[in-house]
Image (cartoon, grey):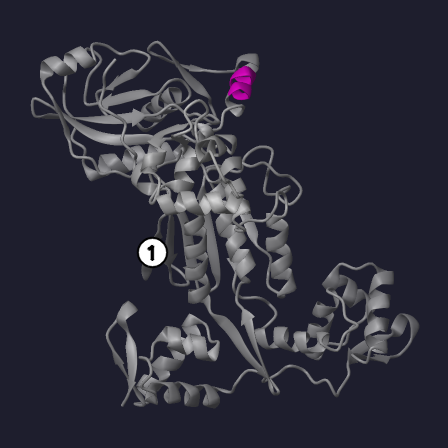
Amino acid sequence: MAYPPFHPQSDVPSPLFMSADDFAAAFPAESEYVERKRGFGHAAVQESAVAFANTDGGVVLIGVDDSGAVVGRPLVAGLTDDIHQAMRDARDPGRYAIQELRIEGVPVVVVSVARRIEGFAQTSNGRVLVRRGTMRVPLFGAELARFINARSLERFEETDSGLTLDDAAADEIAHLTAAYGWSRDVPARLVDHGLAVAGSGRRLTIAGALHLLPDPAERLGKAFVEILRLPETGTEYERRIEVRGPLHRQVERTVAELVGELGTELVVLGVRRYDLPRIPEVVLREAIANAVAHRSYEMTGTAIRVEMRPQAIRIVSPGGLPEPVTVDNIRETQAARNYRVISVLRRLGLAEDAGRGVDVMVDSMLDEMLDPPVFDDSGQTVAVTLPIRSAVTPSERAWVREMEARGLTRLRDRILLVHAARGERLTNSRVRELSGMDAGEARGALQRLRDAGFFVQHGSRGGASYTLTESLGPPAGLRPSKDALRALVVELANADAAPLTNARVRERTGLDRVEALRLLDELVRDGILERIGSRRGTRYIRR
């Protein structure tokens, strides 16, 4: 059976051409590999695609009636969108491509669907379909269980990519060889680690291609990270970056981009300066490494998406959570979709050991007094949201660090110190509410902070309450004043070393992007600065 070749969905292929005789010879009838459709129907095309994905792949011909007559259907933008929507509404449809085929000048739309190697596809209403002859057959009961069990034993990352070591980048092979300490027979070592196909040594698996090709996205679909800088609300991005290259380079470059964009919160406390991370680098690294390592690479038409907004960073990875992991048990349960991929990242020091990644993210955010990561699984994607803003202000975070330098405090004391610094009178019941401690733990924490000189006790026994020791003072006004910030920005504008930009103001002041823009706009309105250029090219000079 010959039919139009499969192209990654990320391609924008030119139309294919066939004569009427060649088309009739290639597609003489509907079969286990071919489905004819006179027009587009969302449910019918989705069901055919799911059945093909769960069997041996195939093509849906839109614009051909049941008798085989070519009635025609051009590949216009609206139809392309409708097909993509039908596939998005399915669960894990895998790899597919959309192509226009012209037969004696009459257009037909070809939807090529690849066989899923790992896992299985489902329709939007949850049915598992397979192709048997010309039929789309749903699976139930014992037959469904056998099918799912068989598919769970296969890993897409270990399949033959069709590429060889000759396609790999020599410096990436050398980098991996040095990381593992291989001294000889590198092809055999690649086989041992699931990066090359057994029996060949030079044919790369999908995992091997992802780590060793100079740009895997050129051959394997959208195997890259897309960074979008977005406003607080809305979907119109202000900046878009594609981070490509071998997977470990993608992790390194994406984290560097995010760290550079976020900057730090600058707080001056007395004679000390605190540069507080808006999101700890280790959290960003682990979130990106997890997205790269655990995404479904069978979903070739979707990149990892990083959305940067003033209030949070959201990282969206194609493919749902691998069973038995759920959002609720994500800290206790581990299952790697791409074990070979993440093993290399761990060897290169870009991911935590098995089972520790989510813990490191959650604990590191807690350690910086930031709100915890939020995970969600739509079935089609997994997303983690990393809040940038917190109920605890940067000045309070810096003040707590100052207090911790005195010693005798514990992790759960932090929130008590913050609320006391805000002028709140703490009681045993309030401490339990804030920290989750039981009554005995709350009493012990309050008395320990009193004995260490942080708190003053008022009353006794059941009526006791505690306030911050007056000499410590609340952390109000610890950040530079508005006048001081204005003076610093004007000083930067007077300097000739580098152009004054929003990024440079953020770097020197610790303001976030919105706060820096607000300050610059104010200086422009006051006639002190002049704005030149727009969007990414905007800079400021002294009037």
Q: Identify the residue at the far right of this view.
A: 461
- Residue 292 spot, x, y in % from top left: 46, 45
Q: Identify the residue at the far left of this view.
A: 104
Does residue 229 show up magenta in the picture?
no
Q: Is residue 237 visible?
A: no
Amino acid type, residue under disc 1 in the picture: Ile
- Residue 404 spot, x, y in % from top left: 72, 74
**Picture quadrant where residue 418 is located:** bottom right
Please report the residue visible at 39 percent of the width from the left and 30 percent of the height from the top: 202
Q: Is residue 534 above or below residue 484?
A: above
Q: Is residue 525 above or below residue 185?
A: below
Q: Is residue 184 above or below residue 351?
A: above
Q: Residues within 10 Å of mark 1 (few under 14, many from 20)?
A: few
Q: How many marks?
A: 1
**Picture quadrant where residue 520 is located:** bottom left
Please report the residue visible at 39 percent of the width from the left and 76 percent of the height from the top: 504
Q: Is label 1 in a helix, a strand or a loop?
A: strand
Residue 459 or residue 20, whichever sits in front: 20
Does residue 146 show up magenta in the picture?
yes
Q: Which residues are magenta?
A: 144-150
Please report the residue visible at 48 percent of the width from the left and 63 percent of the height from the top: 311
Mark 1 = which residue?
241
- Residue 360 spot, x, y in % from top left: 62, 53
Please report the residue visible at 31 percent of the width from the left and 37 percent of the height from the top: 219
Q: Quadrant of the N terminus?
A: top left
Magenta stretch: helix, strand or loop mostly: helix
- Residue 414 spot, x, y in % from top left: 71, 69
Q: Identify the residue at the far front of this view.
A: 184
**Picture quadrant where residue 41 is located:** top left
Q: Is residue 305 above or below residue 74?
A: below
Q: Quadrant of the C terminus?
A: bottom left
